[in-house]
Amino acid sequence: MAYGKGMGGMSANMQNLMKQAQKMQEEMQETEKLLDEWEIVGTAGGEAVVVYMNAKKKIDGIEIDKEVIDPEDSEMLEDLVLAAILDGYKKADEVYQEKMSKFGVGGPGGLGGLGGLL
């Protein structure tokens, strides 16, 4: 039985495929780090509520303008906070999709590179 050269009989095509997969995995790890550091700003009420998060939707902080704090109307403030978070999530999804689509990842919590093979 004849085997190809290198890597215990692995064919040149298989070796090349493995190198490509390793390179893609390294690129994906670099992109994941970039997404951890990317600052997303979600806003609501004309920036009365501002939410800071990364492109993986990890919220780092919230700022609330004192003008929108009304003890008699907490529901309005709750709605503004939720709207700012959702605005940030939408922006984070766009960044995540743009940066990770080349790896076959649909969104945060997706399958991983190469359809989950890595």
Image: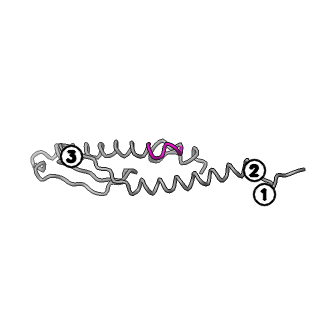
Q: CA distance from mark 1 to mark 2?
A: 8 Å
Q: Nearer the viewer, mark 3 or mark 1?
A: 1
Highlighted magenta segment, given as a residue range: 98-103
**Image: 23 above or below 103:** below
Q: Residue at x 68, y 48 (%)?
A: 17
Q: Given contact means CB atoms under 8 Å apart, are the residues at marks 1 and 2 in contact?
A: yes
Type of amino acid at the residue the image marks with label 2: Ala
Q: Residue at x 63, y 50 (%)?
A: 20
Q: Residue at x 21, y 46 (%)?
A: 78
Q: x and y percent of residue 117 in the render?
A: 61, 48
Type of amino acid at the residue the image marks with label 1: Gly
Question: Which mark is drawn over residue 94?
Answer: none
Packing grade of label 1 (10 A; few <14, some 14-19, many >=20) is few
In the rendered structure, which disc, 3 or 1, sits on the residue that comes first in sequence?
A: 1
Q: Dot 1 corresponds to which residue?
A: 6
38 with respect to 109 (left or right)? left
Does dot 2 land on a helix, a strand or a loop? helix
Q: How many circles with numbers are drawn on the protein?
A: 3
Q: x and y percent of residue 34 in the render?
A: 43, 55
Type of amino acid at the residue the image marks with label 3: Glu
In the rendered structure, which disc, 1 or 2, sits on the residue that comes first in sequence?
A: 1
Q: Dot 3 corresponds to which residue?
A: 78
Q: CA distance from mark 3 to mark 1?
A: 63 Å
